[in-house]
Image (cartoon, helix red, strand yellow):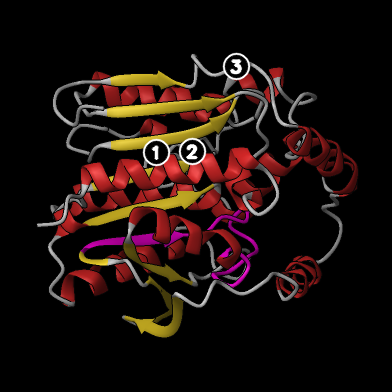
Amino acid sequence: MSNSGALIVVAGQDRPQRVSLRARMLRFALRRMFKNRLRFDVPVQVVRDQVERLSLRLPPPPPDVTVTDVVANGVPGHWVTPAEATEDRHILYLHGGGYVMCSPRTHLGFTWRIAKAARARMLVIDYRLAPEHAFPAQIDDSLAGYRYLLEQGIAPERIAVAGDSAGGGLTFGLLMRLKAAGLPMPGAAVGLSPYLDLTVTGETHYLHAKSDPMIPLPGVVYGGITYLQGGDPRHPEASPIYGDAAGLPPTLIHVGSDEVLLSDSTRMAANLRAAGVPVEIDIWYRMPHVWHAFARYIPEGRAAIERIGLFLRETIKAR
């Protein structure tokens, strides 16, 4: 993969158009146990507590990965440091959860895998959640985390910003904030099933409403409304597909082929390409939303994480 010039690669086309038995079982379970049971008339704190309790069942990272609490410019979080991490490669990771739930702890089951694959130190921040804190509080916290890394003496080109789902939206929203503020760009960006269009006007929002095994269309609408609380859904920090992509860093996007958010990714990739930004969008056949989180169970999750690690090792080379 080249990191110079305007490049878009739709990867995965040469892979067999089939999924593992474990992934097929996961799709069935997600549809039955998550998508078909998701409710929006339950207080969000109840759902948050359930998710946090479930995260306690996750196995801890392996012994060669350390997790250390930190407060980054007033924003809590933790460092994830694999033994093989280089001091020349860092990741600011922004977790998903529809802007209303989840935390660094709920995502630790796969963030350590990304850090290890990239051979990088990873800062995962616990940004403020909606509805208690509306947009742009989450962008403000993401910027605080990025500034914290810069204040540690880390060169911006040695930093990658990455995130999944709503955290993918924050990843590109942060890049839009950095550009508007004239601040230095990171060396790379990674979006995993990123949530980038709060106007909910993408064609796959509707074409894939039934085929997506995990995310219901009302969930996409709910997350945006709860996050914005009357704000402009076309603001480039909220819906980065409406921002100017010129000057953004080399980017990797992963998305499943029948996700409702597929068009968020393809539109963002097209914008980056048109702006001359090196971008690779990797569309994985019939993978559910952020399948990387299930790397413990499915080979496609582990393979996708290894691909992210390779991209970051190639893009942010150790000196």
- Specify the segment rendered in magenta: 88-107
Dot 2 surroundings within 10 Å: few (below 14), some, or many (20 or more)?
many
Residue 57 forms part of the magenta stretch: no
Residue 97 forms part of the magenta stretch: yes
Location of residue 221 in the rendering, given as x and y in whole percent from the top left corner? 68, 40
Mark with earlier residue (2, 1): 2
Amino acid type, mark 1: Pro
Amino acid type, mark 3: Pro
Spatial CA distance of label 2 from label 3 is 28 Å
* 36 shown above or below 116: above
Q: Is residue 308 left or right of residue 233?
A: left
Disc 1, SS: helix
Task: Tell me the residue that label 2 is attached to.
Answer: 196
Residue in the image at 63% along x and 67% along y:
106
Mark with earlier residue (3, 1): 3
Dot 3 surroundings within 10 Å: few (below 14), some, or many (20 or more)?
few
Task: Tell me the residue that label 1 is attached to.
Answer: 240
Task: Tell me the residue that label 3 is attached to.
Answer: 16
Disc 3, SS: loop
Residue 107 vs residue 25, the one in the foreground: 25
Q: Is residue 113 left or right of residue 289?
A: left
Mark with earlier residue (2, 3): 3
The answer to whether one can see residue 195 in this image is no
**Badge 2 vs badge 1, beta-carbon distance below 8 Å:** yes
Q: Is residue 176 left or right of residue 17?
A: left
